[in-house]
Structures are given as C-alpha cells and as structure tokens.
Image: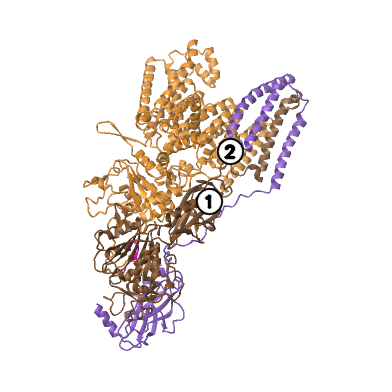
Amino acid sequence: MAVQLLRTTLLLAIVCISYVSAISVSGSRVLVVLDPSLKQEDYAVFLSDLDSRGLDLSIKSANDPHLGLFEFGERTYDHVFLTQPPTQKALGPNLLAKPLLDFAKAGGNIVIVLNSNEHALASVREFAVQLDVVLPFRDTKLVDHFMYDEQASPLLHDALILDPQTLLAPHIVAAPEDVAAKLYYPGGSAFALGNNPLIVPVLAAPETAYIYDPAEETLSSDSPFATGKQAFLVASLQTRSNSRITFVASNLLFSDEAFSKPNSFNRAFATELTKWTFSEKSVLKLESVSHRLLEDTNTTENPSIYRVKNDIAYEVSLSQFEDGSWFPYTADDVQLEFTMLDPYYRLTLSPTHKTSTAQFYATTFTAPDQHGMFSFVLEYFRPGLTFIKDKRVVTVRHFGHNEFARSFAIPNAWPYVSSIVVVAGAWVVFVGLWLFTGENSAKKTV
Amino acid sequence: MRVFKLLIAACVSASAVAAWSFKDGSLTITEKAGTLQTESFSVSKPFSDPIPLPNTATARFRFSIESEESGTSKPHQAYLQISDPTTGLETSFPADVRDNGRARIDVEFKLIPKALLGPDKTLDCKIIIGSFGTEKPIIAYIGSIIPRLKGAAAAPSERFAAKPEIKHIFKPDPEYTSESLAIVFSAAICVLGLLLIGVWIYLGVTPITFGNPLYSLGFITTIIVIEFAFFQYYVGATIFKLIAQSAILAPIAFLSGTRALRDLRARRLSSGK
Amino acid sequence: MHFTTKLPSSAAQALPLIRTLTLITIAGAAIASRLFSVVRFESIIHEFDPWFNFRATKYLVSHDFYSFLDWFDDRTWYPLGRVTGGTLYPGLMVTSALIFHGLKALTLPVDIRNICVMLAPVFSGLTAYATYLFTCEMKDQSAGLLAAAFIGIAPGYISRSVAGSYDNEAIAIFLLMFTFYLWIKALKLGSAFFGALTALFYFYMVAAWGGYVFITNIIPLHALVLVVMGRYSSRLYVAYSSWYALGTLASMQIPFVGFLPIRSSEHMGALGVFGLLQLVAFASYVRARVPSKHFKVLVTVSATSLLALGLAGVVGLTLSGVIAPWTGRFYSLWDTGYAKIHIPIIASVSEHQPTAWPSFFFDTFMLIWLFPAGVYIIFQELRDEHLFVIIYGILASYFAGVMVRLMLTLTPIVCVCGAVALSNILDIYTNLEKPLETDDEDKTKKEEDQSVLRLGSMSKKPLIGVFSNWSRAFVLGSFTIYLFLFVQHCTWVTSNAYSSPSVVLASQLPDGSQHIIDDFREAYYWLRKNTPEDAKIMSWWDYGYQIGGMADRTTLVDNNTWNNTHIATVGKAMSSREEVSYPILRKHDVDYILVIFGGLLGYSGDDINKFLWMVRIAEGIWPDEVRERDFFTARGEYRVDQEATSTMKNSLMYKMSYYRFTDVFGRQPALDRVRNQRIPSAITDPSVKPISLNTVDEAFTSENWIVRIYKVKDLDDFGRDHAIANAFEEGKRKTAGGRSRSAPVGGLSKGKARVLRE
C-alpha cells in the first residue's frame, strides 16, 4: 500500500512537472481572428492580458488567405478566438461551420464573439444552431429601460450596466466579492439558448430587458426575439469530449473602454472567461480508480469478478488544474453508481485523505444479491467542470457450490443430518450383528 | 434606419420625472362557451386570488396605459410577463397597444411555454411598461394564474447535478426454526435409532461366533472405511477423492462381502438343518 | 422362429465371432456414414447449439471440474449473465473431457475440437450396440443385428448425430437405448444389480439431455401397465424400486435438475407408481397371510382411500405451488397451437413445429411401414418387455407427430420393430428345411422361450408355412431390394439433407464445381479481430452461440432463451424506430449489431424472414409499443418493397438489412432474392428517399452480404440529436438564415408556445 502510494505520488509529481510550464492542459497556441474593422488598439489590454498569461497568440485578419485550423489533419492551434467582421459576408472556407465543429471535436477550444453592430455571419450562425444556440437576427438590439447606462446611452437604453452577482456559472466566472463591481455591456444583441444540457449559461440579460429589431419594430416591440432572462449575453458549452466553446454577445465587453469604466468587472470577467474556455481552470482529472474486496487488503486491485454479497471498497482520486498546476479537487457531491441496467446503488463518495495533487474519495458497499455484469459508474458531470466519466464492468457471480451455508449450520437440517447418521450407524451395526451372531439366531428369527 | 432611431429619440423630451403607469386593468377568462371569470386589477391592487385557467381557455388582459408625459400613450415595451416563482423561468407576451393607450393581451393556454406548466403551478403575472428616453418605466405585479394542465407535465430537460442516493434493498435472509426444536427432533431420531438397535440386540443376539473372521472382519471394516470416506466428502473433500477411494474400496467390499455372506449362509443352512 | 435351422457345432462356435464382426462393421458403417460433412467441408462444429457445447467443453478442459460447475458466464446475456454451470446438462462436456484427458494420459493428445466433432459418430456406433442388446431381449440376435444395422444408418438419428453435430442428443440416444436395455434386463431378472445399473445410466442420461423425462415417464408407465394387467411380480418390484430410488437421488445431483424430481409435475408419475408398487407389494404380502374374504375388503378399502389420499395430496401441493405445474413446453406437446399463442419463443424454433407426414418416410424409409408389423408380431407374444416396446412405440409416434425434433426418439423404436418384423420374415423365408416334428433340441430351446405353450399347440395343428421356393425367392429378393434401397436412401438423405454444417454454405457454380459461401465465419472472424475484447454484440438470439463460440464476443441473448424479457428487449430494439431503439442500445451497452441478410444471395434463413417472430415476442411484453399488425400492409401482406408499411420501413431491422442495398444494383431494379420483391431505389426513382441510419454506422458487410455488422454511435459530442447531427454531416444544413423569423428555439413563432431555456 505504502509503495503503491509512493508510486502514485511519484507519478503525479512527474505529471505535474510536465505540466508546470503549460498554462492550459490542451496547449497554448491561440488563433485570434481579428477583423480589420476592429482596431487592435481598442482591445490592447485584453490581448496583452492573454499574452501575459503565457499564451502564444497569432493574431490574424479574417481575410487572411492562409488561415486554417488544420494542417494535414492535425490541429494547428489549440484555441480559437473568433470575432465577427461586420463587412464581409463570410469568414472564408476554413472557418465554416464544419471545420469549426471538427476543430472542437479534435479537442480545440473556441471563443466566438459576436459583433456589436452586425452580429453573426451565416457560417457562425450555422455552427451555433448545431450547438442549440440561436443567434439573433441581424441588427437587433438588446435594450432595458430599467437598468441602462445613463451616461453611455441616455435615450436608446442599449448600453447596460449589469450586476456581476447575477453570474450564473460559478465554475466559469465566479461573482466578485466586491458587491460594488459592475459589468458594463456597451451595446449589442443577445442570443437565445435551447435545452442542450451541455450548455452552461454564464450571463443572462436582466428580467426587464428585451431584444428588438430596430428595422421592423420602430414604434413598439410586438414580437421580441427574446425577453428578460431568456436572452443570454454569454454562454458556454463543453462538449462530451471536454472541448470548450464560449459565445459572447458583443465584442465591446472586452474593449479597453469597458475595462476602464469605474468599478468595472469586465477585465476580470474577460480573463476568467478566456481562462475557462482555454482549459486553464476548472479542469478536472481522474487520477486513480480502484475497487477491491473490503476485508482483505492484499488482494489484487480492481479484480474483474466479485461474488454476490461481497463487501466492496471503492476509491477514486480527483485533481483540479488551476494556474498551471494540479491541486486536489475537493467536493461533497462525487457520486458512484453500481449499475446493471438500472443503478442498484448511487452513493455519494466521502473525501478521505489527500496528496499534494489529488483528493481521494472512498465508499464501501455490499454487492447486491443479484448476479450479473455490474458497472462501477463514476459520472461527475457538473456545469463548468470537466466531465469525468469512468465505467468499469465487473462480474458479480452467484454463490459457488461450496459457498452456501453448510447443513450443520442450519437448524432445519439437523433432523435430516441426524437421520442420515443414525441410518448409516444402524446399518453398520446391523451388518455387524448379521455377520457375527451365532447359529441360533437363524432359528430364532423366523 | 439610424435616422429614424434618432427621430424617436428626438420625440422623447428630456423631462426626467415623468413615469409610465396603467389603469382600468381587467382580466377575463373566456372559453368558446363564454366568459368564465372576470377580475380587475390596477398598479397598486392586484387581483386577490390566483385565477384558474382551463386548458381550452384564453386569458384576456385589458388595461389603459398612461403616460405622465403628454404627447404619447404608446410605449415601446408593453409586456405581460408570466413567471414561475419556484424556478424563476419567465416569458413575456407583448401587448397590442392602440394610440389612445388601450392595451390588450390575449394569452391562449396553448401559448404558455411547456416548461411553465405543471400540476397546480401558480404563475405570477407582471406588467412591464417602458420606453426610450427618460420616462420612468414600471413593473407591476397584478396577480397570479393557475393553468390547469391536462395530462402529465413535460419532463424537465436534463441538467447535470448530483442525484438522489439509492441503496439496494436485499432480499430477507431465509428464516430457520429455533435450534431447540431441531435438537428435540434430532434427539428423537437418535433415540429411535438406539431403540432399533436395542430391539435387534434383544431379539437376536446370541454369543458371538466367528466362522471365518478374515472375510467378515474385512467386510465390516471396508464398510466402516466407506462410511468414513463419505463423511470426509461431507466435510469438504472433493468428489474425485471419493471416487478414487470408492474405486479401491468397492471391489474389496464386494469380494469380502460375497465370501463372508456365502460363509454365513453356509453356516446358517448347516445349523438350520 | 420355431423353425430354427440346425447348424453344425463348429459353425455354432463361430457365431459369436461373426456377430462381433458384424457389430463392428455396423458400428464402422454408422460412423462412416456420418462423415460426409468432414470430408466435404472440414472438421467443424455445426449449427448453433453445438457451438455452445463446444465452448463449454473448452472451458471444462481448460479449467477444473468444480469451476465448471460454478461457472458464471459473463460473456452471454449481457448484462444479466448466465449461471451456466447450473443451467446446463454437463454430461456431454464431461464425456468429451474424459475422452480428452484419457487420450492425453495414453500420450495421444487430440485437439478437443476433433473430439467434439467425432463424438456423435462414435456414440452412434455405441447406439447400434445398445440397440442390438435391446432387440436381443425382445426377439433374438438376428433381429438385434438387423436393428443395429438400421439404427446405424437411419436418417432420423443421423440428422442429429453427424460429425460436428456436437449436441446433447449425440450421446443421449445411446444412453436412452442402453438404459432401456438395462431396465428390461432388470425386469426380466428381477435383479437389484441391474436396477442399480439402470439407475446409473439413467443418471448419465439426466446429466446429458433434458429428454431424460421421457425415461422418467415411460418406465413408470410400463410398470403401471404391468400392474394393471395383473402382471405384478417381485421382479418388477425389485427392478422398479431400485431404479426409482437410486435414479431419483442420482438425478437430483445434477444442479440443473435439482429438486425437480420431487417438485415438478412431469416427475410425479414416477413417484406415484413407486408408491403404488409399494402398496401392491404390501397387498400381495398381506394376501399370503390373510384369508381371501377379508383380503378383498381390505384391499378395496385401503386402495381406494390411499388412491384418493395420494391424488388429493398431489392436487393440493400443485395448487399450493409446492409442485410446479406443467410447463409450457409440456402443454405444447398436447396442444400444437398452444405455443404459438402463449410462448412465441418456443413456436419460433423450426424444430418445434409439427411434423409433416412425408418426413416420417424421409427419416425412416421402409421401416415406417415395417414398424406396425413389428408391433403386431410383438403383440402376439406380449411378454412383459414387449409391453415396453408397445408403450414406447405409441408414445414416441405421438410425440414425433407433434414436434419435428422428437422424430429422434421415435427412430430407435421404429428400427427395433422394423428389425423384429424383418427378422421374422427372414426367419420364415430363409428356413429351407421342411417342417419336422419338434425334436429335443428344439424343446430345450423353447423352454427358454416363454411362448412354448402356443408353439406347442401350433405344432399339433396342420402344418402351416411357406414351402415353395418361388415364393421364398420372391419375398427374399424383394426384401433384399428394399434393403438396398434403404441403404441408398439413407446415404442420399445423409449426404444431401443432414450433412451441412450451416455455418458454411455450399453452392454449385454453373460449371458444377462446388463453391463455398463462408460469410458467417468471415464476419465472426472480423469481429474477433477488429472489435475490442469486451465489445457487446447484439443480434437475434439464433446467432448468440455462434458469436460466443466463433467471435468470442459478449452477446445479449443466445440460443439458451432462458430470459424471454431480454429477448423481447432485443426484439423491440430491432423492430422499433431508431429513436426508440437507441436508448435501449445505450442502456445495454451495445457496441455492435449483427444482422443476417439473405436478400442479395437468396439465403432464406435471414433476419427479415425471422423478423415477425421478433415483433411477436416483443409484442408479448410491450403490446402498446410494438404491434404485429403494423408490419403488415392493409391487405395483410408481409412486404419489404415500396408497399411496405412505414413501421416496417422505419424499423431498425429493415433499415440495417437494406441500407445501401440498392447501390449494388445501380440502375438495375434492386431485387430481394429471398422475398422476390423490388426494394425502392433512389437511383431509379428520385422520389424515393434512400435509407439513412442516424444512430449506427455500417462497420462490416460480408462478401455475399449475409452478415452485416453495424457499430452503435456514441452520444453526440455536441449534445445534438443524432438525426440532426447526421443531417449536418450529410450536408443538409439546418436553415438558419440571417433574417429568418422562424427561429427554432427561443424565438417567437406565431401561434406556438416558446421553448424556454430551463
């Protein structure tokens, strides 16, 4: 056990060392597609923030003909930060919906920032629809007559000041401790979301906000695209293979101007959001999984077969990636299912000991009185955290012929057992009597 | 378009204290057959009890929008917001506002989003009025409705979270009789056996005579050894051991047995004559 | 019979040698005629069930006996598993393993596969010997030799015992005949020793085949008939009691049988007769000591009261559930329509269908008309053992009429009776001597014979017989021709009907040369080499054993059919739309689906032809979700062409069978050669939508398309519905125009409720 522990720790240490230099678990090459209409100077702080985190930025223009996400079938970047050009009709053949989906499938992360003026292009819209994100119609505006920025848009009410305390996904962007902090939304639209469980909404519009189309709804809003908290400003999606995609409704959220406003939370928001999307935080890792018979600790780990009503011990360890290294991940909602078609057990694992990089969780239970192929299913799916899935099929066999209670342990059987003994004994006695009695007996017994 | 937007902005004057409001609010629940219920509400006074909305009915909201500012009674945003206070889900129905400020919103049952429907769910109704410019918008709670859903509510969409714990319930262990009862019966059987042996001895024992002791003794010894082999099997030896033992013992028992019994028969016949 | 030819004493001495040689030759012929498939194809295990037996034997050989006994099979019935050690008849595997280890001990290591392949032919030789012994007890040795020759090559037995047909029946028929022989012997001699031997072989039979119930019922029936006919004797008592007591105890040692002998209705007859015999024995003991007047009263009172008590006990125990009521398989023996209504899984097996009358002739040729003659001859004599043959004959004839597979139990008795009849004829017509007054030698011979009285009286009558050489020559000649025809017929049937391994198919090329269609093994080998070791394969249950044996992959259901619900689940997954099937597939961790499709080649035993059984079995469990009616057109036809119902066309099975089928034909009409229907093709008819599969990917299709394997897709990476994801991959973009007012989610569309993000 101690040797094993040492070994795992060593292994973890090696893993840690190899990751120490890496800022993100999936790599540091970022492609920033910046439209020429967006001046790099306007986003200097944001870009330098990215750069200072150790990311390797390649800032390219959307009409760069050499723009490509793949080369010889391999990803050329680890992350894409994609802004929308207001002028062009399309982003070029390398940024169509399918390459973007393939990029995410291949493990790349994507941030899509909609343009505050024209919003999304057809290819991005198509990409979004595949993910159950419905982008607004062109030229629509999000307004709120209750919470607008009185300085920025006293009449049009399209620049909003939001309360960062209403942020929806603490694992992606946690609400600031400073209650006076403000999130400035300098204008743009918002989008609607479907019920795809993989989507994690990050920032929703205020209850009284709505989206209208200035071209068609000049006098009154008679068919709003989305209203209130159903309009979303920022939403993320983590694919089942743990690629991360984030949609941001307006590029202005990341502008130097928004960063420099009083009490602005925007800069921290942008940092946290990109950190999450580029797998720099909230990344979990399953360090080890083991199950064994409870009573004897020296049996082989992870046996493939158990018996009905065996006591089983199960242990996992989880690590979390934060700021370039792995730490123990502690939570109280890690659950194990012991399943055959349906779960027979669903147990919350309790944290036990921890190493410098991993937190151990354990539980024990008795195998059900039903034989079959059972699975230890650890499915730790929490919004904003890496999906952890581990499924191990083991056989739970029936009692062997010599594993039942013996007849001398069952009171009901005692009369039968004693009958057998008596009959056998009496027979031996009878044979003895028959063999060794004298000649007279033949006369006596008829 | 931008010019037009500016036009709206220009229309709106800069007086800061003015606010939107409404009056003469009424809610009528109608079905094809006719009116079911009518309630009235105002900014400060919502209708008192939650109002049931049958699944074939329409809730018709009527109210007059007022602006403290002269010139217009038609705001850009005039919504009825229906929300579920337990989940926080909400949706809005835009009002059809005439120039004189009369607003009407007809909420057909089938237009209420599925996610808001459920058995005995009470939904809050709020009216939101606001527009560009500086006039103060208003959001006012006007009461609750209870949509009567027929059939099962739509299953909620999957969300990742911890699930309730499950523990397997085992079948009860088999029940045994009390040990004392078993002992009594076993003892009775043993006594019966002893009794039987006693009767044999009483009836038939004469002085022991050995015809040819080799075969007889061999026979009974083999029988005892066989019994012992069976006992070993019962205690836990493998069947193969028993088979091997029997393979050796059975011929011995057979040979010695036939000889012993033949001797015995001969002796009995001779003594019987 | 009584015209026994006198032989010189030297010839009489040579007779045993000749008999032995004849028997050896017969055994050789029996073995040789079963080797067609090995010669034509190769040494391969046949069909379906033998693959399981083979797999179990390999397990037994590679593990020890006790782990075989406790074997929990986690490669079948995923995820339920099967307590295989406790739910099989181990006799066959243990026999093979014993032979294997025995040969190894003799330094003759033989591959276990070859032992398994050759086991059935070798045991057929033993069957011939057992039949010889049995028939000798009925008539004489010449009839015995004839019977041995008949059973050696009768197609009704060969059908289940060719080389490679490694099934329980391979050894069971030998055990059946040998047990019967021992029973007759025990009955004749009144010997407890033979009774115990009967019990021993009965135990072997119980260990080998579920058909042991036949013995369990026929021996008591025989005893009962003897008692009722007033032929009770102490011999019967000894034979029956020793057999029943030892045999029942022994049979309970087989885990699969367990407490059935005292708990199930099928075994109650034997117990009842055992009780009755005790009563009768007691009664006859009392009769010897009590005056007959009292005796009669005593007997009537005690017999009626005991009978009533026993009956009431059995009925009461059955009602209270202590004794299991008759099983469905048993009911289907009496009511041929029962299975189709109540247990479609039994009815779906072709060998459980009622027998067509030509198959009696096909399987036994001339013996089927010699059979009644033999029964008649036996009836004339009617000794105790003859009653047995008559009872056996009647019961087996009935059962063979109900179920095709029970032809097997009929064949031995047909051979025995046929041999008795034929040997009788030969006895009469080969006796070249003129009848004489019976001399001393004849008399001593007749004393052994119980029919001495009748014969004696016959010999006093005017002589009746056939003395004309012409008629002798005619009859003998015609029977010689019959026998030749019989051999020819048997060889022909064996060669053409019963020697196909069905794993490998043979066809003739236009030039007459043989062409082997090896799609099954090709596909199973593909599975073995290209899928992960723990991959779960879903297929219809027919192929479960073969996948387990040849591909070594985990299956959901197999030919064991112990869990009807699990089979129905597979049936439902196959017969439902993809959206319904996919969650079932996910829940059962299915990685691959295997379907058999014969449409391209004209292989009629494919899954589309079995499809209605899947539907029926699924309907039995989910009558609301799967309906057989939906798979028939309005006119009640089962079609797969453009007139097929939409339920049919949308079922997973249909889609997997015909997926890209039309592509093979190009502009030609896509003809399904099994059903002779044209599959609608998108190439020739643009209005047809080609079959698209959203939740599975085609992984493998064998050379002749007989086996098609599909891989079940994982959940979509982006949380999309598979249909949407597939449409996107195929380039059918979801409309999402820049100014479109019909947003699918979130947005407002007139007259419809919004979909909210919850």
Rendered brown, the chain in question is A
Label 1 resides on the chain identified as: A
Whether B115 is drawn above or below B43: the answer is above
Whether C425 is drawn above or below A234: the answer is above
C421 or C207, nearer to the observer: C207
Q: Position of residue B6 (x, y in %)?
A: 27, 81
Q: Secondary structure at mark 1?
A: helix
Bin the neighbour count of mark 2 within 10 Å (Cα to Cα): few under 14, some 14-19, many 20 and up: some
Q: Secondary structure at mark 2?
A: helix
The picture's colour for chain C is orange
In the picture of the structure, the residue carrying the numbered disc 2 is: C272
Q: Is residue C386 left or right of residue B241?
A: left
Rendered purple, the chain in question is B
Q: Position of residue A175 (x, y in %)?
A: 44, 70
Q: Is residue A215 left or right of residue C144?
A: left
In the picture of the structure, the residue carrying the numbered disc 1 is: A5
Instruction: Tell me the mark number nearer the camera, choosing from 2 and 1.
Output: 1
